[in-house]
Amino acid sequence: MNKAEKVRLAKVGKKLNVKSYIKNEIAAIREQVGDKKVLLAMSGGVDSSVCAVLLHQAIGKNLTCVFVDHGCMRLNEAREVKKVFKGQFGINLIQVNAEARFLEKAKGITDPELKRKCIGGEFIRVFEEEARKLGRIEFLGQGTIYPDIVESGVGGHKAVKAHHNVGGLPKDIGFEGLVEPVKYLYKDEVRAVGKALGIPDFMVQRQPFPGPGLAVRCLGELTKEKLDILRKADFVFRDEMARAKLDRKAQQFFAIMTNVKSVGVKNGARTFGYVIAIRAISTSQFVKAGVVELPFKFVTSVAEKIATTVKGVNRVVWDITPKPPATIEWE
Ligand code: XMP
């Protein structure tokens, strides 16, 4: 075990002191990486965002971030990431639009685990291609956090899902090693570190978003049509939650494309549209989660708004299942 890993492991089970964590982690990254280069997978989520800024503070221009748009991102996500990390922080950021490539690869796959593995595998291949274009890059940075490790079956724990940032990594990845600056932190701790690093509030407070993105919220085969519908419905729900100031009550809230179609009526005519589900959960460590008791009036108004304004949707259901027995994501 290298010195940097020892520094990170020393944190496990202890209360986080944000200031000293940042100081130690920057030193640990420098110790691990030296003057070599790091390529970081940025997903737009809190974890990889915090990693990007930590790495940037530690090694500056030797960090290159790659944001792969796999076609399963939320509405406006790519634009926001560019604005903050390239614009505000001056981080070396490359955005790759790989939507068509991912959808082609995932064609016909309906099994949740196969979908995750397909996306995870393709994700790494896109990185390798980008890395090759950039010349020699020795390290791969990743925003792995502690619950990811626990739930992916590492360290004697039983696997729940193949998280693409832990389980899906091919052996022949072509990098000398991994740099995982927030590996032993829980989500709330990652946020505290992000805030102290000066990442804007709307990003630090942003709910976690899984690596495979909307792919784990779009049941059945991934198609552009279904993903576009989901993106719009998800935006309406998140926007309404923020307007009603209910976003503070939930750690995660999002829409799900159920892949089920049902009959409805619009302007006196029969419709046959998708059923969208909405889910809002509260949790501290994401290992267990409760359902947020949203006001019923709010839920019905959101349902009506989604079903009337998002083309292709005519019914909305509310997921009221805690974790366990359900997981937070649907796949
Ligand atoms: P589940 O669905 O397992 O989710 O209850 C627990 C937390 O992990 C997030 N999640 C992921 N995060 N890559 C990630 O980086 C993944 O593959 C992944 N799958 C689930 C999920 O959003 C929740 O916060």
Image (cartoon, rainbow, N blue to C red):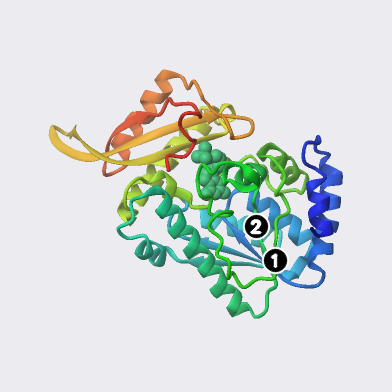
Residue 133 image offset from top left, x and y in percent: 58, 79
Seen as rendered, the residue at the extreme front is 156
**In the image, residue 52 above or below residue 235:** below
- 60 or 330, which is in the foreground? 330
**Label placed on residue 260:** none
Q: Is residue 70 left or right of residue 15?
A: left
Q: Residues within 10 Å of mark 2 (few under 14, many from 20)?
A: many
Q: Is mark 2 within 8 Å of ligand 1?
A: no
Q: Quadrant of residue 119?
A: bottom left
Q: Is residue 198 visible?
A: yes
Residue 327 image offset from top left, x and y in percent: 48, 35
Q: Secondary structure at mark 1?
A: strand
Q: Quadrant of ligand 1?
A: top right
- 24 or 170, which is in the foreground? 170
- 6 or 245, which is in the foreground? 6
Q: Secondary structure at mark 2?
A: loop
- In the rendered structure, which amino acid carries the disc numbered 2? Gln
**Label 2 sits on residue:** 142
Q: Quadrant of residue 314?
A: top left
Q: Is residue 210 visible?
A: no
**Label 1 sits on residue:** 177
Residue 231 image offset from top left, x and y in percent: 40, 47
- In the rendered structure, which amino acid carries the disc numbered 1? Gly
**In the image, residue 150 above or below residue 142:** above
Determine contact: label 2, label 1, CB under 8 Å. no
Residue, x 80% and y 43% (percent of image)?
Answer: 11
- 180 or 252, which is in the foreground? 180
Mark before the other along the chain sequence, 2 or 1: 2
